[in-house]
Image (cartoon, rainbow, N blue to C red):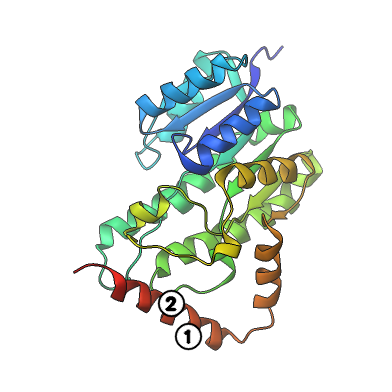
Amino acid sequence: MNRLQPVTVITGASSGIGAALAREFARHGHALALVARRADRLDALATEIAASGAPRPLVVAMDLVREGAVRRIGEALASAGLEPQYVVNNAGFGLAGLAINRERAEQLAMIDLNVRALTELSLAFTESLARHRGGILNVGSMAAFVPGPGMAVYYASKAFVLSFSEALHSELAPRGVRVTVLCPGPVPTEFAARAGVKHARPPTFLVQSAELVAAAGYRGLMAGRRVVIPGLANRLTVALIRFVPRRWLLALIDARQARRRAAQPS
């Protein structure tokens, strides 16, 4: 008999949307395993969640781009008597600037985290997800719906997340496993600073807090929705994108990114 207890694994849980997702799942009674590189931040979040009356989350300090990271996460869970019921793939980062000018190794590392690690984690625990009638929540972006000159590799990585998650939604449905892709617009987090954008000024009507995004993602996953785009304005924007010629989208995004680059201090 399998005696491992179900847990929700959340990557990139040390800040931003990931930390908000951890609080949201804990608020709904889920046991958690928090994964990120910064152990001190994970410990602080685990202490905060435990202080709210929820079970203290398991902290797994792990760099997901390291070889064997997913295997070691599985071993850490098993050692604690746990196995995944839900996997939340939130870890990821962006890089602003022309692809030909950015360090290639840095861009490949972004693909490793945004694409390869997400794919491996989505596929690694399907047996326990099915056993517990759980699911996968992959954090994408509104960037997935458009080409992204000026952040070409990042936009492409999120297009992969959207396509992969939608396909997995269909493939795993017969096994009772829900797969949802969460595609937020701009969120005030550390993302812009990590991407190298020092003066990000997204349209205010598209901005959502990490807490609102996390709540929308949780509701969507539990309802078995395929795609969740938090915010009415964001959903309308994505709907309108389908009617705009691709060359116009390229020109619009290219112009916006060029203005952003020009605003950066030299």
Q: Quadrant of the N terminus?
A: top right
Q: CA distance from mark 1 to mark 2?
A: 9 Å
Type of residue at label 1? Ala
Q: Nearer the N terminus, badge 1 or badge 2?
A: 1
The percent position of residue 136, horizontal first and vertical second, equals 65, 41
Is the residue under label 2 in contact with that under label 1 (CB below 8 Å)? Answer: no
Residue picked out by circle 2: 256
Q: Residue furthest front?
A: 204
Residue picked out by circle 1: 251
Q: Residues within 10 Å of mark 2 (few under 14, many from 20)?
A: some
In the displayed structure, 201 sits above or below 228; it is below
In this rendering, would 200 be left or right of 161?
Answer: left
Residue at 30% of width from left, 72% of height from top? 263
Residue at 53% of width from left, 20% of height from top? 57
Q: Quadrant of residue 192?
A: bottom left
Residue at 44% of width from left, 34% of height from top? 14
Say which element carries label 1: helix
The percent position of residue 248, horizontal first and vertical second, equals 54, 87
In the displayed structure, 71 sits above or below 254; it is above
Say which element carries label 2: helix
Q: Nearer the viewer, residue 77 or 90?
A: 90
Type of residue at label 2? Arg
